Image (spheres, rainbow, N blue to C red):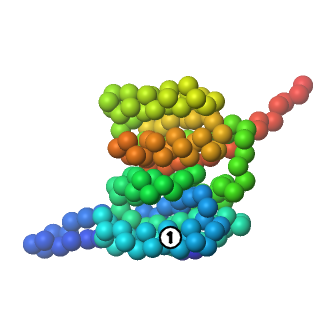
Amino acid sequence: MKILKHTTMLTIGGHNMLIDKFESYIINIAGLKSRPTRKKLTHLCKNITFCESFQYSIFKQNNVFALEVSLPKQQLPYLISFLSFHNYSIYQILTPKRVDELLDSEQLYQSAKRFDLAIDGLQDAFIKDKVIDIMNMYANHHEVNYTLNNNYASVTCPQEVFTQLLHTIATRNIDILSASYHAKMLHKARIS
């Protein structure tokens, strides 16, 4: 697995202008252990036209298949929405530095887990209201607890519910920038 990162420069009248910075992301998608699902996803990625110079690969890390993409940072929410509209269940959206945090989507854990969801513009009242409406809709039917910060939603729910929640948010014109599992931190108690 190689990490792709580059910047496109445009020279106009002797002045260099920064066009766009490409970033790599790891997207954990359900069902990628299945060869037909990987083939279908590869075909879909080949036909992406909304982003020039889009690069992708499907790789395997610790027996977990995932999609690695390289694209301009502002194109990531469009890709997440695009995959969601094509009914791919997304479990995580990570940077390559966090590849060791990939969850095995084939092992569904029924117990609630904490996930952090980075949402662009969450400080905007309109977007925040849309997110709250979606969260409350899920909280009425599933065991979902959440808190909202400036750019993050911390969500505690079963893994399967989180993918449905992510799908709903992505298909409602809300830009998702990352989605990660938040492992519990064990603090050592000091006994005196």
Name the residue located 38 percent from the left edge and 27 percent from the top edge.
129
Q: Nearer the viewer, residue 159 or 137?
A: 137
Q: Is residue 129 left or right of residue 145?
A: left
Task: Give the position of the N terminus as an image quadrant.
Answer: bottom right
**In the orientation shown, which residue stands out farthest toward the right?**
192
Up the image or down, 25 lies above or below 141; here it is: below
Residue with the mark numbered 1:
40
Number of numbered labels in the structure image = 1
Q: Is residue 183 left or right of residue 76?
A: right
* Percent coordinates x, y for residue 25 in the rendering: 49, 61
* Percent coordinates x, y for residue 70 in the rendering: 43, 67
Res. 184 visible in picture = no
Name the residue located 48 percent from the left edge and 46 percent from the top edge.
167
**In the orientation shown, which residue stands out farthest toward the left?**
13
Up the image or down, 177 lies above or below 68; here it is: above
* Percent coordinates x, y for residue 107 in the rendering: 72, 53
Name the residue located 64 percent from the left edge and 44 percent from the top edge.
159
Q: Is residue 10 left or right of residue 81?
A: left
Res. 26 visible in picture = yes
* Percent coordinates x, y for residue 6 in the rendering: 38, 70
Name the residue located 50 percent from the left edge and 29 percent from the top edge.
137
Q: Residues within 10 Å of mark 1 (few under 14, many from 20)?
A: few
Q: Nearer the viewer, residue 10 or 155?
A: 155
Quarter occupied by residue 23: bottom left
Quarter occupied by residue 114: top right
